[in-house]
Image: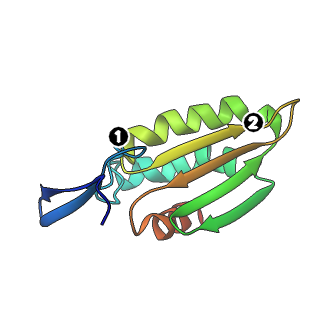
């Protein structure tokens, strides 16, 4: 364990909190969506399907998913991130916009179980 590590009491016992670059993360939040099943279905059919349909490259990561989209997808990415961060509070979103009109990478990560959650959410 590093000096930057700290233990805090969680609902089910101690939760390791890392201080430093990830100190603002919500690593102890449960991997759950707060939307009703009907709202999830609506979101999948509209907002998510529109964004996922534009993905050029999709790859799983150790803690989530990375997708690459065309440069003109930025507003759709931002709209989706804004909506999803409210109901899936455990998710971390990293957006990389390449220079000169290049592609945009969106990485979604979180605590253990995030990759499986995203796979289930995004399956058609």
- Tag 2 residue: 73
Residue underneath mark 1: 24
Asked if residue 86 shows in the view, the reply is yes
CA neighbours of label 2 inside 10 A, class few (<14), some (14 to 19), many (20+): some
Q: CA distance from mark 2 to mark 1?
A: 27 Å
Q: Earlier in the sequence, mark 2 or mark 1?
A: 1
Taking the image as shown, residue 47 lies to the left or right of residue 115, namely right
Q: Which mark is residue 71?
A: none
Considering only vertical position in the picture, is 50 above or below 57? above
- Residue 28 at x, y = what percent? 27, 56
Q: Residue at x 35, y 40 (%)?
A: 24
The N terminus is located in which quarter?
A: bottom left
**Residue 115 screen position, x and y as percent:** 51, 67
Q: Residue furthest front?
A: 3
Q: Position of residue 17 (x, y in %)?
A: 27, 54
Q: Quadrant of residue 112?
A: bottom left
Circle count: 2
Q: Position of 103 compared to 50: left or right?
A: right
Is 78 placed above or below 14 here?
above
Between 34 and 78, which is closer to the camera in this rendering? 78
Left or right: 104 in relation to 1 = right
User: Could you tell me which secondary element the residue under label 2 belongs to?
Assistant: helix
Instruction: Look at discs 2 and 1 and give the one toward the viewer.
Output: 1
User: Marks 1 and 2: in contact by CB < 8 Å?
Assistant: no
Quadrant (top left/top right/bottom left/bottom right) for the C terminus: bottom right
> What residue do we see at 57% from left, 43% from top?
94
- Please name whichever residue, 62 or 34, is drawn nearer the observer in this view of the structure: 62
Q: Position of residue 64 (x, y in %)?
A: 53, 62
As rendered, which of 74 and 43 lies closer to the eye? Answer: 74
Q: Secondary structure at mark 1?
A: loop
In the current view of this chain or complex, which residue is farthest to the right?
100
Between residue 87 and residue 64, name the one nearer to us: 64
């Amino acid at each position: 364990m590093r000096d930057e590590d700290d233990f805090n009491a969680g609902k089910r016992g101690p939760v390791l909190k890392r201080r430093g670059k990830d100190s603002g993360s919500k690593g102890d939040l449960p991997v759950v969506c707060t939307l009703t099943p009907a709202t999830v279905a609506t979101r999948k059919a509209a907002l998510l399907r529109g964004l996922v349909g534009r993905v050029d490259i999709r790859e799983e990561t150790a803690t989530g998913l990375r997708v690459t989209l065309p440069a003109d997808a930025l507003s759709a990415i931002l709209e989706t991130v804004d909506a999803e961060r409210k109901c899936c509070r455990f998710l971390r979103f990293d957006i990389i916009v390449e220079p000169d009109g290049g592609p945009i990478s969106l990485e979604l990560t979180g605590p253990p179980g995030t990759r499986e959650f995203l796979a289930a959410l995004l399956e058609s």
